[in-house]
Amino acid sequence: MEEARDFPPGLKQANLKKSFKLGIRSLLTACSKEEFLKAFPTFDKAKQEYLYQLFIQVIASLHDNVEEEFESICYETKVGAALDTVEGLVEEKSLDVLSDDTANFVDVKQAVSRAKKDEISYLTNMLKMVVQHNQAMRVRVESLKKEKRDSSVTTDIIDKLNRNSNYAQPPKG
């Protein structure tokens, strides 16, 4: 990682510190003055006020100590530098117009490849169906040709029988 810089903290680092301070403030000031005074009902008002002021000083001191400790831990572990680096990488990624397009190209390539394979499969199935249909049509044509030949032969035989039967009959008239 980079060395600690003297630049102002990045947005992520500033947000972390701001969130921590808001969280610690709400934790340390969760007790209202009324609730605090209820804890000491036997004391007179002056002593209650004195205890409350003491409580406020302790909370303020504790708040400062916790914040200092947090800052110290962030500095020792270089959290700020890490967050700044992350922020820079995120910004760099958002500025890289081709980063998302690369994934889109891969997706498009896969989609086109899948579509071509599907089309090849569809056309292969259609070709098989056409071949089967053609074979069925050939069989039908051959059957019709045979029926026509058989019909022609039958017609020839009937014609011959009719001619022969005409010879066998006496002439009309």
Image: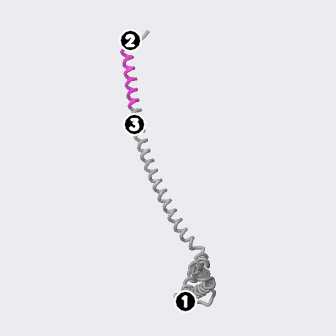
User: Could you say which is closer to the camera, residue 81 or residue 122?
Assistant: 81
Across the whole image, how many numbered discs are drawn on residues? 3
User: Could you say which is closer to the camera, residue 70 or residue 116?
Assistant: 70
* Residue bounds of the magenta highlight: 150-171
Query: Residue visible at 47% across and 57% down?
Result: 120
Query: Residue visible at 56% across and 79% down?
Result: 39
Kind of residue sitting beneath label 1: Ser
The tag earlier along the polypeptide, 3 or 1, is: 1
Vertical placement of residue 63 versus 164, above or below: below
Residue identified by numbered label 1: 72
User: Could you say which is closer to the camera, residue 106 or residue 35?
Assistant: 35
Kind of residue sitting beneath label 2: Pro
Q: Please, what secondary structure does the residue beneath circle 2 have?
A: loop
Residue identified by numbered label 3: 143
Tell me if label 3 and label 1 are in contact, CB under 8 Å: no
User: Could you say which is closer to the camera, residue 133 or residue 66?
Assistant: 66
Kind of residue sitting beneath label 3: Ser
Is 136 contained in the magenta span? Answer: no
- In the visual, does 23 lie left or right of 140? right
Residue 155: give x, y in percent of width and height.
40, 26
Q: Please, what secondary structure does the residue beneath circle 3 have?
A: helix
Taken as a whole, is the magenta stretch helix, strand or loop? helix
Residue identified by numbered label 2: 170
Tell me if label 2 and label 3 are in contact, CB under 8 Å: no
Query: Residue visible at 52% across and 66% down?
Result: 107
Label 1 to label 2: alpha-carbon separation: 140 Å
Label drawn at residue 101: none
- Crowd tier of the residue under label 1, counting other residues whose Cα lies within 10 Å: few below 14, some 14–19, many 20 or above: few
The tag earlier along the polypeptide, 1 or 2, is: 1
